């Protein structure tokens, strides 16, 4: 009953709708809101199987850029990760980006972006890692 109350409250607040930060365009297979909803409503075993089916799916979401972090490595180029707040969870989506993109992105700006789901970490919160990401 508690899960349904949380979902109902989120729906009433406009968080899980066909618009807003949970939204994806009609052609998208899954929204961030659907992943959250299923995590609340499924058993751990059911969610583990569900998330396996999401790996590789292309998504188009929007969210506010929290930060871009640099990971300098000893014997290779620096890698950059954009951390994006989707649906008010900070940060909830991680995207590897090029140096050029890392320099162009603005903190606290809202972006539409698309990419392929590479990983979903559901320990404590839902973190989605995307690959092949493009920002609009």
Image: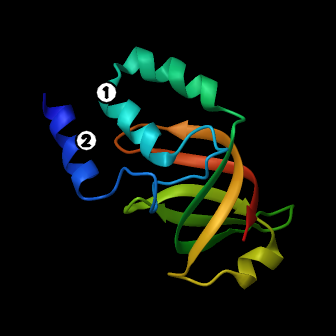
Instruction: Answer with the quarter of the image where residue 79 lies.
Output: bottom right
Disc 2: which residue? 7
73 sits to left or right of 32: right
Q: In this rendering, is residue 108 above or below 16? A: below
Name the image quarter holding residue 37.
Answer: top left
- Does dot 1 land on a helix, a strand or a loop? helix
Mark 1 highlights which residue? 41
For residue 20, side relative to residue 102 (left or right): left
What percent of the width, then of the height, locates residue 71? 69, 66
Marks 1 and 2, how far apart at CA = 9 Å
Q: How many residues crowd around disc 2 within 10 Å: few (fewer than 14), some, or many (20 or more)?
A: some
In-image side of 57 versus 125 (left or right): right
The label shown at residue 117 is none
User: In the rendered structure, are the residues bearing label 1 and label 2 in contact, judged by CB atoms less than 8 Å apart?
Assistant: yes
| The N terminus: image quadrant | top left
Q: Is residue 125 above or below residue 91?
A: above
Q: Residue at x 50, y 54 (%)?
A: 23
């Amino acid at each position: 009953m508690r899960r349904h109350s949380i979902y109902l409250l989120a729906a009433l607040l406009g968080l899980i709708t066909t618009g807003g930060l949970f939204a994806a365009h009609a052609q998208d297979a899954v929204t961030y809101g659907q992943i959250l909803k299923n995590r609340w409503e499924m058993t751990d075993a059911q969610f583990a199987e569900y998330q396996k089916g999401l790996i590789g799916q292309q998504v188009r979401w929007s969210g506010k850029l929290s930060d871009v972090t640099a990971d300098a490595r000893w014997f290779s180029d620096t890698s950059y990760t954009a951390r994006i707040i989707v649906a008010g969870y900070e940060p909830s989506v991680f995207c590897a980006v090029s140096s050029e993109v890392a320099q162009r992105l603005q903190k606290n700006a809202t972006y539409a972006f698309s990419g392929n789901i590479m990983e979903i970490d559901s320990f404590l919160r839902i973190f989605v890692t995307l690959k092949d990401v493009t920002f609009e």
